[in-house]
Image (spheres, grey):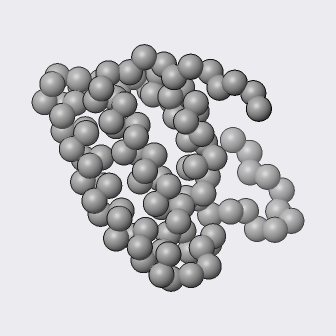
Amino acid sequence: MPELPPLPALTRSEGELIDCYLEVVDLLGRINPSRTTDTYGALRAAQALVGRAVALREALTVMHLRGETDLHHATLGRALRVLDGERRSSLAAVPPEPGAPPAAH
C-alpha cells in the first residue's frame, strides 16, 4: 500500500472544518438516493446529518470569530485529497448513466 503524503499544516479550526465537512459528505453519500438501497440506513444518516451540519457551522463560526476570515483553498484542498475527499465526495454525486461517456472536467 503506498504511503500517503503528509497532511498539510492546519490550524485547529481548519482541522475541525475539514473533519466536519468530510463527515457531512460521508452522510450525504449514505443518503444519496441514486446509491443507497434501504430507507432505514438513509434515515439514520439524515438524522445524523443535522448534528454534523451544526458542528460544521460551529467550526466556521469559531474561525470567523477568531479572525480567520480567509479559507486557504489550496491548503484545505490538499488536506481533503490526503483524506480521500475526492472519493468520499463522489459518493454524494449522482453517478453517470451506465454506458455513458465520462463527464469532462
Asked if 83 appears above or below 99 in the picture, the reply is above
Q: Residue at x 50, y 55 (%)?
A: 26
Quarter-wise, where is residue 21 in the image?
top left
Q: Residue furthest bottom?
A: 39
Q: Taking 34 as reference, is 10 left or right?
A: left
Considering every residue shown, the one lying at the far top of the view is 9
Q: Quadrant of residue 72?
A: top left
Question: In the rendering, at what x and y percent does residue 2 appear?
Answer: 75, 27
Direction from residue 8 to residue 87 in the image, left or right: right
Q: Say if residue 80 shows up in the picture.
A: yes
Q: Can residue 74 be spotted in the picture? A: no
Residue at x 42% of width, y 77% of height: 43
Q: Which quadrant, please, contains the C terminus?
A: top right
Q: Residue at x 39, y 70 (%)?
A: 46
Residue, far front: 1
Q: How many marks?
A: 0
Q: In the image, what residue occupies the spot 15% across and 25% down?
A: 66
**Most foreground residue, 34 or 99:** 34
Give above or below for 24 relative to 17. Answer: below
Q: Decide if residue 84 is on the left or right side of residue 60.
A: right
User: Which x, y percent locates residue 102?
Assistant: 79, 52
Quadrant (top left, top right, bottom left, bottom right) of the N terminus: top right
Q: In which image quadrant can residue 104 be found?
A: top right
**How far from the left and from the top, in percent, is residue 20?**
36, 45
- Residue 93's x, y, as percent? 59, 59
